[in-house]
Image (cartoon, rainbow, N blue to C red):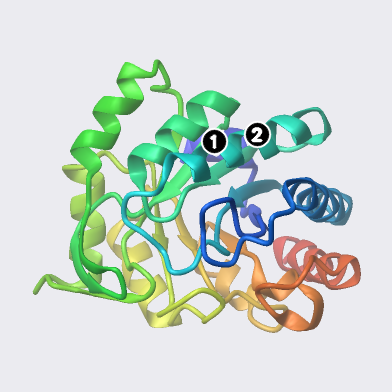
């Protein structure tokens, strides 16, 4: 927990910079400069609102893959490199849903943290989904990034676990056997809320490990969630009209952080 708070501060808000669809993916619009400029606007709006950290992700690269094309990782590195001088808070990366690509991107950009599905076996929209923590952590070492703080999502979106163990049991195992630095609890898909009882059960199982809500945190729920979790990751709630694929709405972002500051002060 000490390392977590040294990086993010207490009860942090990690806000998503969702990149537009990248080259080689079905929704790519052929405008690389547009991807950079849209990311810049979102980044600046989030920082102005007072978020504690940002995370760059390729949420628009639908349908998702479990091993991404190198063009996705390369383009994400290019975009982050273009914005690097404007990032004023700790930043992280997530290349959906490829742990090794995520490690490579973190090493290339100097990211402080990374998020992925590192453990478990799931039946998913992408087919059979198997965690690759062993490969990913060995790759992290090969890249010289043992300092990279890893957020393990233990309840994958768009999927169901093929594992008889309970969610708290899977979370404890991710820390014990797979060396998770922090554990994330998700709803069923991007933008959909975490069940508070799931979050509470995982936190009770891991009292000394950072546990964060990973999806669906909204203005009206953030105070209650922060009463249980050690932090939140948020994207959709900060977008225009609360739609995942829209740009960040500065007013919504400021209002969200106002509620966070109020909750922290209790």
Picture coordinates of residue 239 (x, y %)?
76, 72
**Point 32% across, 49% down: residue:** 67
Picture coordinates of residue 118 (x, y %)?
29, 49
Which residue is identified by label 2? 78
Q: Quadrant of residue 122?
A: bottom left
Instruction: Return the mark for residue 74.
Output: 1
- Does residue 250 appear left or right of residue 168 in this picture? right
Mark 1 crowdedness (10 Å alpha carbons): few <14, some 14-19, many ≥20: some
Label 2 with label 1: CB-CB less than 8 Å: yes
> How many angstroms separate mark 2 from mark 1 (CA)?
6 Å
Q: Residue furthest front?
A: 30
Q: Is residue 187 above or below residue 19?
A: below
**Point 50% across, 41% down: residue:** 71
Picture coordinates of residue 95 (x, y %)?
47, 48
**Point 69% across, 55% down: residue:** 30
User: Which of these two is toward me, 180 or 141?
Assistant: 141
């Amino acid at each position: 927990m000490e390392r977590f708070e040294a990086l993010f501060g207490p009860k942090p808000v990690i806000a998503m910079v969702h990149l537009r669809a990248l080259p080689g993916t079905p929704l790519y619009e052929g405008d690389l400069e547009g991807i950079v400029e849209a990311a810049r606007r979102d980044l600046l709006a989030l920082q102005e609102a007072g978020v504690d950290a940002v995370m760059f992700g390729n949420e628009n690269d639908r349908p998702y893959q479990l091993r991404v094309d190198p063009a996705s990782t390369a383009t994400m590195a290019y975009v982050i490199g273009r914005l690097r001088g404007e990032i004023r808070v700790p930043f992280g990366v997530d290349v959906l849903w490829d742990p090794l690509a995520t490690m490579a991107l973190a090493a290339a950009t100097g990211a402080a943290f990374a998020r992925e599905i590192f453990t478990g076996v799931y039946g998913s929209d992408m087919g059979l989904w198997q965690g690759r923590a062993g490969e990913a952590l060995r790759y992290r070492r090969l890249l010289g990034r043992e300092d990279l703080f890893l957020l393990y999502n233990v309840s994958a979106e768009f999927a169901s676990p093929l594992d008889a163990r309970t969610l708290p049991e899977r979370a404890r195992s991710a820390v014990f056997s797979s060396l998770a630095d922090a554990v994330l609890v998700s709803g069923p898909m991007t933008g959909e809320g975490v069940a508070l009882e799931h979050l509470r059960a995982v936190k009770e199982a891991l009292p000394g490990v950072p546990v964060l809500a990973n999806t669906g945190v909204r203005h009206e729920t953030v105070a209650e969630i922060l009463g249980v979790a050690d932090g939140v990751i948020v994207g959709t709630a900060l977008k225009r009209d609360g739609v995942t694929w829209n740009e960040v709405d500065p007013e919504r972002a400021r209002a969200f952080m106002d509620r966070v500051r109020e909750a922290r002060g209790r």
